[in-house]
Image (cartoon, helix red, strand yellow):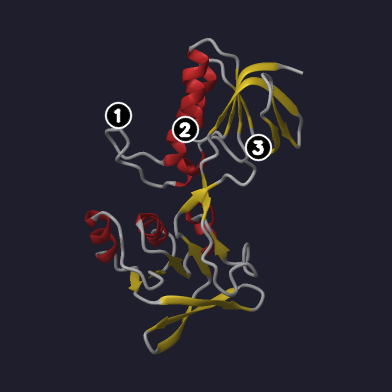
Amino acid sequence: MTMYDVIIIGGGPAGLSAAIYATRAGLKTLVLEKKAPGGKLGEIPHLENFPGISEPINGLELAYKMFQQAQKFGAEIKYPEAVVDLELKGKVKKVKTREGEYTALAIIIATGLEKKKALKPGEAKFIGKGVSYCAVCDGPIFRGKSVAVIGNEEKALEESLFLSNIVNKVYLVTDGEEIEAPETLIERVKQNEKIEIVNAKLTEIMGEENVSAIKVENENQVWKIPVSAVFVAKGDEPKTEIF
């Protein structure tokens, strides 16, 4: 069993940055990433506010650059490899995955965030059948159709704009909340003819085998909106359940 100086759990921007610093300091470093290097960064279709990036860049491209840089300095990066258990007592720490067991003198936890659920009837039933948490991943499946994006913050607006390049119609359902995002982003959404802002609460995701509509409610009014997909974009929460 290989002994590492440091094991970094999570291969997003924070984990890869830690790997760069650790390897440059001469530490034998292992990064364990559950999915793909870059984490949520890889889901951003248009990035223009990252220091040092003078022209807009795709998040996936930037994530790959970080991955290459960490490898260049000597970091060992294993993916997809999910951590299932930890032993943090004692001088030597143990990290267990489904693929094996690793030891190190130090552990850096950089597990990042996971998508919040909408917690509405029909959501769980239609995951993978029209309900998605990643417009970049699944948007192209619904090319030429109508979709709903659920959320009122920056991520929801970004996903709506991304989807507007693929689908015929985007219903941005704020779930009864005021939109909270940079004014420039709000204006881009309002000026996009393919996006309709729906100031109402989502009450149900409907369909038979796949999503076919959503039910929304505003004050005393209830109505259905025909859609082929629902993209939940209500933000993220820390992935700390294993700890």
Q: Residue 145: image x %, image y %?
A: 48, 70
Q: Give me the residue at 53% from left, 77% from top.
A: 204
Badge number at residue 14: 2
The 10 Å Cα crowd at callout 1, few under 14, some 14 to 19, many 20 or more, is few
Work out how far the residue at label 2 is from the one at label 1, CA to CA, in angstroms: 17 Å
Q: Are marks 2 and 1 in contact (CB under 8 Å)?
A: no
Q: Position of residue 168 (x, y in %)?
A: 41, 68
Element at label 1: loop
Against 220, residue 49 (above or below) is above
Q: Quadrant of residue 180?
A: bottom left
Q: Callout 2, which amino acid?
A: Ala
Give the quarter of the image for residue 52: top left
The front one of 40 and 241 is 241
Badge nearest the viewer, 2 or 1: 2
- In the picture of the structure, the residue carrying the numbered disc 3 is 80
* Residue extending furthest toward the front: 90
Q: Looking at the image, is 183 positioned above or below residue 172?
A: above
For the C terminus, the image quarter is top right
The residue nearer to you, when weighing 77 against 6, is: 6
Cα separation, mark 1 vs mark 3, equals: 29 Å
26 vs 212, nearest the viewer = 26
Comparing labels 3 and 2, the label whose residue is closer to the camera: 2
- Residue at 29% x, 62% y: name it: 189
Q: Amino acid at mark 3?
A: Pro
Q: Earlier in the sequence, mark 2 or mark 1?
A: 2
Q: Secondary structure at mark 3?
A: loop
- Disc 1 marks which residue? 52
Q: Residue at x 76, y 33 (%)?
A: 99
* Residue 208, x across and y down, in percent: 65, 78
